[in-house]
Image (spheres, helix red, strand yellow):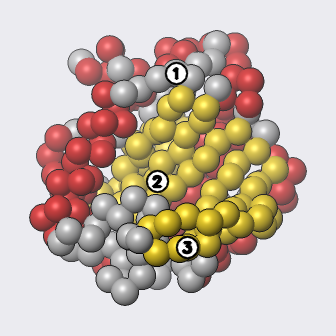
Amino acid sequence: MLADHLPIHRLRLRTERLELRLPDFEELGALADAAAAGVHDPSFMPFSIPWTEGGPAEAARSVALWYHRAIGRWDENDWGFPFVVFRDGEPIGVQVTGGKKFALAREVDSGSWIGMAHQGNGFGTEMRAAVLHFAFAGLGAETAKSGSYIGNDASERVSRRLGYRPDGEEVHVVRGERRLLRRWRLSREDWEANRKHEVAVEGLDGEVLAMLGLRGDDESES
């Protein structure tokens, strides 16, 4: 089985309503379809790389190619876990969490999208809560960071609900326009104080930890 060679395929994160894991090829196709159906209001670009701007077919292909790049370029010292978010077996979006030199830095970053048909139900908060539990309880992270462009109120609300604190702003250029990105940072203490979702982590064993640049004895209670 593929999981024998890529142990990260064994990993599962489960919340009250969602499952986060790597997809098979058919599920990846369904995820691409979800992206083609719409991810955000066309008048506001929430991403630094505007992968949705070419239309439905281009957005779908971008999702499929992005996933293969994330797996194909895996580096234990600079990884980004491309969790696909499932609701009742249907892929509805993506929640990425990543770490650079995580064994020393103990810091993760995150990014996400969710199909417009599934927005407004609290899934965005629940899926990020899942990867935060994975990072802090499962991997022993000390801090987590995220970012949202000013005007992306939904993403900002998720960060605030989960206990992130503002961490300054930085200037980006997106589609030839100057944009302000608001940074967010979450400490272990603030994560503990704001935990509201039950999360179960399955399949986090020594082989998975090794793919994340950690030794088997670094595993924490999950």
| Residue 140 place in picture, x, y as percent | 73, 32
Q: Which residue is mark 3?
A: 179
**Label 3: how many Cα within 10 Å (few below 14, some 14–19, many 20+):** some
Q: Gap between marks 2 and 3, in whole Å? A: 23 Å
* Mark toward the start of the polypeptide (3 vs 1): 1
Q: Is residue 150 visible?
A: yes
Q: Amino acid at mark 3?
A: Arg
Residue drawn at 48 percent across, 48 percent down: 96
Residue 140 relative to residue 18: left or right: right
Disc 3 on helix, strand or loop? strand
Disc 2 target residue: 95
Task: Mark 2: give few (<14), some (14-19) or many (20+) Cα within 10 Å.
Answer: many
Label of residue 157 in the image:
none
Q: Amino acid at mark 2?
A: Gln
Report the front residue among 175 and 117: 175
Q: Report x, y in % for residue 54.
A: 20, 68
